[in-house]
Amino acid sequence: MWGFIIKTTAKANLIKSAQGVELRPVVLIKEKLARSRLLMQLSLCQRPILDAVNLLLMPIIRQGHLALSNVSLSAKSNQVTPQLHHAWFLLSYNRIELGWWEIDKCTLDQLASGYYGSCLTAAKSPLRAPSHSELRIVKRIIMAVIARLPVTDMDADKLELELVLNAAPIKATACCELSFPPGHDGHPIRFYMAEHLLELMAEQPSQYQADPELSEKLANRLKQIPLRTSLELGHQSMPVTSLQNVAVGDILPMNLHSRCPLTVGKRPLFYATVHTHEGQIVAKLTQEAFQMEEQSNG
């Protein structure tokens, strides 16, 4: 008999970042489940986010501008290229990217006019770069959105917002899109969330609170659970070999108990005698089983 040893050697190739190859990290099952639960929890924040942004859009809504009517959340798997004819802003925390905010320049200009404008303000083109006033408005909106997300406490002084000036692709994990009613020409407002923002999120504890009287109610309920009791009237011992000859119709002798044990499960609690009362067979408890055992042991 001949034996062979086969040796397999793994090979690895170096992938340079300049090649632009899309890499997908290996995700453990527990991490994947945690991410799924986090995205489900994030979806519960959609309506509060919509209400918070509409509240800050109130200056132009009062002037006849339509309010946001729909919000959707989607997971992103591909890169997004900023379209700079809209206003793009980068939000970072401790110099680490948290997300990107996209808003139509005309909508932003109208909003800035609603907050800071007056009849004496000179007209400006909305195609220009956003002003410092508009930057402050966008930061207020983003902070209102962040406040509705299940994120850990962050130092507001370490949050930085800056204008995106180049069209370099961005890698977003999820996107929250706020859109106007159908038929409105306004561009949707989008918040692209970076991976680090999801890392700062934590699964919120359940809002369910136990009834303070649960222990007492449970104790009362346990007392109402029905238990089956059995009364043994007699017994008869038989050898195993005799069981082979037992058939239907046979009459077996039975030794009746003078004191019949009353059991719950397999534990005898009382001894009783059998009587008839008003046409019904009843058991009269005569002695507790543990007292019988004490007398026999004594």
Image: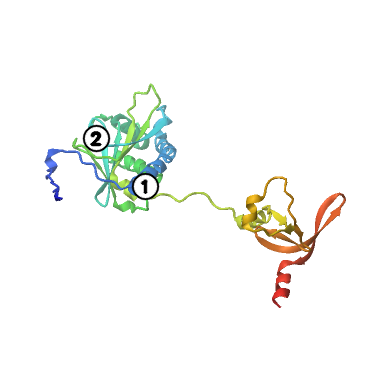
- Helix, strand or loop at mark 1: helix
Mark 1, other Cα within 10 Å: few <14 / some 14–19 / many ≥20: some
Q: Position of residue 91 (x, y in %)?
A: 28, 44
User: Image quadrant of residue 85?
Assistant: top left
Q: Report the residue marked by disc 1.
A: 34
Residue occupying image coordinates x 56% and y 53%: 210
Mark 1 / mark 2, whichever is N-terminal: 1
Q: Position of residue 175 (x, y in %)?
A: 32, 37
Q: Position of residue 90 (x, y in %)?
A: 26, 42
Whether residue 186 sits left or right of residue 20 in the image: it is right
Whether residue 287 sits left or right of residue 177 in the image: it is right
Q: Quadrant of the C terminus?
A: bottom right
Q: Nearer the viewer, residue 106 or 257?
A: 257
Residue occupying image coordinates x 42% and y 30%: 69
| Kind of residue sitting beneath label 1 | Ala
Label ID, residue 80: 2
Q: How is the image coloured?
A: rainbow
